[in-house]
Image (spheres, helix red, strand yellow):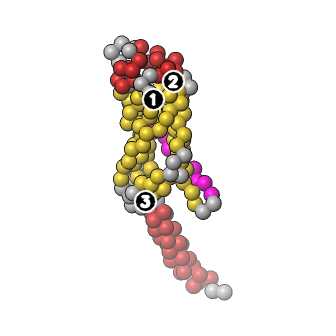
Amino acid sequence: MLPPMKLSRLLPWLCASVLLFTGCQNLQSKLGEITVTVVDLKPAGGTLLESQAVLTLRFVNENIMPFGFTGTTHKLYLNGTYVGKAVNNQSFGLPPLSTTTRDVTLMLENLALVQQVLAMRGKTTISYRLDSVIITREGDNDLKMPVRTQGTLDLQALGAAVQ
């Protein structure tokens, strides 16, 4: 055991070393984000009566390492109201510091809201919120990462299909 005098001199250096070490480790473990945004929303098969739409999503990897997805789920809200859900079970990868787009089928569970929004004269831009869950596999475990994005969406493609 160290005498109290030596311990009191050693203690500040020990604390500084621990703080420096944990600070560096936190810096190394911080990764950039994976973001998912809506690029386009258009009818599947040319009409909304099928209660499906094609949702084009942009995935952005801000990390310096590649990222692999085993699947994704997405819930779309227009003007704060839930519209529908898309599930993608196809695996895909995203290189470091890159973007890719994917089309997923959106099952419209609130078709009346979509038609009501499109009926507004002269306004085809609407605010959206997308709640996504990115699924990746580590060994035998599925890891789920929630991602929420907000923005505006131009609905002219849907408007042309309904009219």
Residue depicted at x 54% and y 76%: 14
Frontmost residue, 128 versus 100: 100
Q: CA distance from mark 1 to mark 2?
A: 8 Å
Residue at image coords 35%, 23%:
156
Residue tagged by mark 1? 44
Q: Is residue 98 above or below residue 163?
A: below
Q: Secondary structure at mark 1?
A: loop
Of the numbered discs 1 and 3, the one sitting upstream in the chain is 1
Q: Earlier in the sequence, mark 3 or mark 2?
A: 2
Where in the figure is residue 64, as x and y percent of width and height? 39, 61
Residue at the spot of label 2: 50
- Is residue 68 at least partly visible in the picture? yes
In the image, which disc is placed on residue 66? 3
- Which secondary structure lies at badge 2? helix
Q: Which residues are magenta?
A: 141-150
* Amino acid beneath label 3: Pro
| Measured Cα–Cα span from mark 3 to mark 2 | 37 Å
Q: Position of residue 140 (x, y in %)?
A: 63, 60
